[in-house]
Amino acid sequence: MADIPTAAISRLVTYLRILEQLEAQDVSRTSSNDLAERANVTPFQVRKDLAYFGRFGTRGMGYTVAVLKRELVRVLGLNQTWNVVIIGMGRLGQAIANYPATDYRFEYVGAFDIHPDLVGTTVRGLEVQHTNQLAHFVQQQAHTPGRVDMGFIAVPPESGQAAAQALVGAGVKGILNFAPVVIQPRTLERAGHHEVSEEWHGVIIENVDFLAGMKRLAFYILNPQLKITDSEEHL
Amino acid sequence: MADIPTAAISRLVTYLRILEQLEAQDVSRTSSNDLAERANVTPFQVRKDLAYFGRFGTRGMGYTVAVLKRELVRVLGLNQTWNVVIIGMGRLGQAIANYPATDYRFEYVGAFDIHPDLVGTTVRGLEVQHTNQLAHFVQQQAHTPGRVDMGFIAVPPESGQAAAQALVGAGVKGILNFAPVVIQPRTLERAGHHEVSEEWHGVIIENVDFLAGMKRLAFYILNPQLKITDSEEHL
DNA sequence: CTATGTGAATGGGTTCACAGCT
DNA sequence: AGCTGTGAACCCATTCACATAG
C-alpha cells in the first residue's frame, strides 16, 4: 500500500458515514453509483478510492452495506480505541468534549487548561487539569490501557504552538488542531531551520478551522463564476 | 480571472493570518520565502497563489506586509460586512456564536433552533427564534443592511439537509455546514435527479467537520508511512 | 545581486474505457 | 447483462527555471 491521495481518505470517511446511514435504514446493498450520488462524487471516484485498499464488492452485484462498512472501519482504524486529551477547555473545548455520539471508541481521557477558573472544574466526567500536568499525565498513562493516542488543541491561536509542543514533547503522535494557526512541525527555537526535530518525527497534524471556512465561503460567494460545485466538499 | 485551484484559496486565508501576525509584531516587510516557511508551503506556491490575483510585491525587495494584507483582504471579500444566521443553537451553535474575535465584520444577525428549551433564550445578544421563522426573518431583512449573506448549520446530522433547504428556500446563497452529513444541492424530493433545482443554483457549500478530522487523524497515525507532511494542512 | 512574476515542465489525482467476474 | 476493478489517458495543480524589475 502506497501513494494514496489524501483526498481519498476524506472521501472514505464520507462513504463510511453514508454506509452507517444506509444500515440505519435497513438498506443492505448499494453500488458505486448509489454511493457516488450520496457523496456528490463520480462512481469512478468511488471505485478507485475503494480499490486503493482492496476488492470489497461483487461484480454485477454491487456492495453489501455491512461488509463495506466493516472494511472501511478496519481501513480507517476505527475498530480500536483512540484515547484523546483536549488542551483548552473554554467554550470550544467544552463543545467538542460534549459533542454527542462520538461513536467509534474515541475516548476522552484528559482535559487541560491554564486558566485558574477552569482548572478543577468537571467536563464530561473529566476533571480539568492544569496544562503543566500534561507531560506527567501522558507519561503516567503511557503503558496502561489509557495510553494517550491523540491531542486536540482548542486554545487561542497564540497558544497553539506551545500546546502542540507540549503534546509532542509528551510523546503524542497525532494532533487535531482547532486553533487558527499553522502548527510548525519543529521546536520553536529551531523555527527557521528546516530540519524536523527528532521528537516531531512522525507527528501527524490535522486542522479544523471554521474561521478559515467562513473566509473561504465569503470568497466563493463573491466569485460564483469559479463554479466549484464541490468547493471543499471533502476536506 | 478564471480557473483558480480551490486549495489556493485556503492558502490565501493562511497567508492573510500570517500577515496579521506579522503586523501585530510590527514586522513591515516579508518575502515569498518567509511566508512559505510560516505557512509550511514552498515559495513557488506562495508566488503562484498571489499571481492569480495580481502583482503585490516588488522585485528584489519582497512584499510590504500592510500592502499584501490589504490586497488579500480585498481579494477574499473581507472588507465588507457579512451577515450570518446560525441554525442550531445547541452547544456547538453557542460555541460558534461566542467564539472570540470574529474579526473582519462577520456579524451574527439571527439564531434559530427547533428545541423549545432553546427558543427564546439569548445567545450573544440574539434571541433564539424558532426555525420555522427563518424564511420570514430572511425575507424581512432582505432589503435592509441586515440582509442575510450566509447561514451556518450546527444541527444534528439528520436535520442538516432540512436546515440547508430552509436556508436556500429563503434565498441564502452561502452555507457553512458543521453537521457531519453531505448536503445535497437539490431538493429532497428531487434527490436522485441530477439536475440542480433552480433555487439551489449558485449556492456555495463549505463543510467544517471535526468528526471527519478525528477519523482522518486515526488513519494517518496508523499509516505514518504515507508520509503526508501536510495531510490537510490547508483545508 | 536580490526576489518577484510567469510560461513551461513535471507529477499526481481524476476520468475514462474496458476487461473481468457473477 | 450488470457492475466492479483497473491500466491508460487526461487534466490540472504544483514545481521549476528564468526572464524581469528594482
Image (tube, coloured by chain):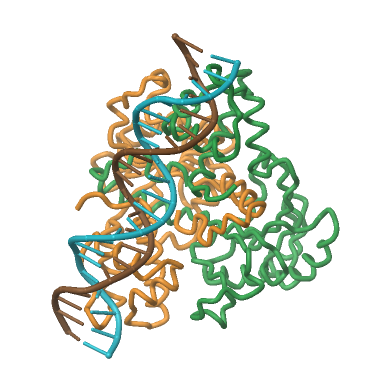
Chain colours: A green, B orange, C cyan, D brown
Q: Is residue B127 above or below residue A203?
A: above
Q: In the image, what residue occupies the spot 35% across and 42% down? A: B174
Q: Residue B13: x percent and y percent?
A: 38, 61
Which of the 4 image quarters holds residue A28?
Answer: top right
Q: In the image, what residue occupies the spot 27% across and 26% down? A: B198
Q: Residue B106: x percent and y percent?
A: 37, 54
Q: Residue A44: x percent and y percent?
A: 44, 32
Q: Is residue A100 left or right of residue B193?
A: right
Which of the 4 image quarters holds residue A119?
Answer: bottom right
Q: Is residue B16 left or right of residue B57?
A: right
Q: Residue A164: x percent and y percent?
A: 61, 68
Is residue A57 or residue B88 the one in the foreground?
Answer: A57
Q: In the image, what residue occupies the spot 82% across and 61% down? A: A141
Report whether residue B136 is seen: no
Is residue A138 or residue A53 the one in the foreground?
Answer: A53
Report whether residue A30 is seen: yes
Give the mark count.
Answer: 0
